[in-house]
């Protein structure tokens, strides 16, 4: 998909002298972009009450993202995305579906170190599922979670 481009010439200043270096371009990679449509149910947070509000006083070491979608098959890969406004409060965790968890709701832990930087802000929680059989990616709808301020 062609798009706008700009020339890029890096400038490096060794020993306080501006020097221009030659830039060579590699072959361009065409990429297709599209919107992922939510085809999977929204995740839930076990410690949230109501379902879209988390009180940080209830967070000890971890919070638990609940994925209640039993149609996952062995070798599928589930990735939980925890996205806060603060980069220190963002993480992803991945789980390969095995015989043991196939067909069961899942409970994945997110450490408190990713919750606390988001106090007073929204966190977007979703999961993606890579289907081993079709090599397609499916996406859940997003849980918009408010992490309250800690009240002393």
Image (tube, rainbow, N blue to C red):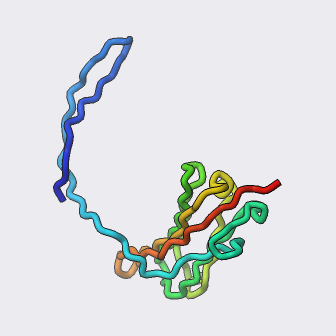
Q: Position of residue 84 (x, y in %)?
A: 56, 57
Using the rendered view, name the quadrant where residue 95 is placed: bottom right
Which residue sits furthest right? 152
Up the image or down, 82 lies above or below 97; here it is above
Q: Is residue 34 left or right of residue 71?
A: left
The quadrant of the picture occupied by the N terminus is bottom left
The quadrant of the picture occupied by the C terminus is bottom right
Q: Is residue 23 left or right of residue 79?
A: left
Up the image or down, 107 lies above or below 90; here it is below
Up the image or down, 102 lies above or below 136; here it is below
Q: Position of residue 77 (x, y in %)?
A: 48, 73
Q: Is residue 38 left or right of residue 93?
A: left
Q: Is residue 23 left or right of residue 124?
A: left
Q: Position of residue 110 (x, y in %)?
A: 64, 63
Q: Nearer the viewer, residue 141 or 146?
A: 146
Using the rendered view, name the quadrant where residue 114 is placed: bottom right
Residue visible at 56% across and 88% down in the picture: 103
- The mark total stands at 0
Residue visible at 51% across and 68% down in the picture: 79
């Amino acid at each position: 998909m062609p798009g706008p481009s700009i020339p890029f010439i890096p400038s490096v200043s060794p020993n306080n002298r501006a020097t221009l270096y030659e830039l060579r371009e590699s072959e361009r990679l065409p990429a297709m972009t599209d919107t992922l449509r939510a085809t999977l149910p929204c995740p839930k947070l076990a410690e949230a009450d109501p379902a879209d509000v988390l009180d940080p006083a209830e967070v000890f070491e971890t919070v638990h993202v609940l994925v209640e979608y039993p149609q996952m098959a062995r070798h599928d890969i589930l990735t939980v995305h925890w996205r806060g406004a603060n980069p220190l409060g963002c993480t992803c965790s991945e789980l390969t579906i095995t015989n043991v968890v196939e067909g069961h709701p899942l409970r994945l832990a997110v450490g408190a170190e990713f919750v606390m930087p988001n106090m007073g802000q929204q966190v977007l929680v979703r999961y993606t599922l890579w289907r081993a059989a079709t090599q397609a990616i499916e996406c859940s709808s997003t849980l918009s979670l408010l992490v309250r301020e800690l009240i002393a």
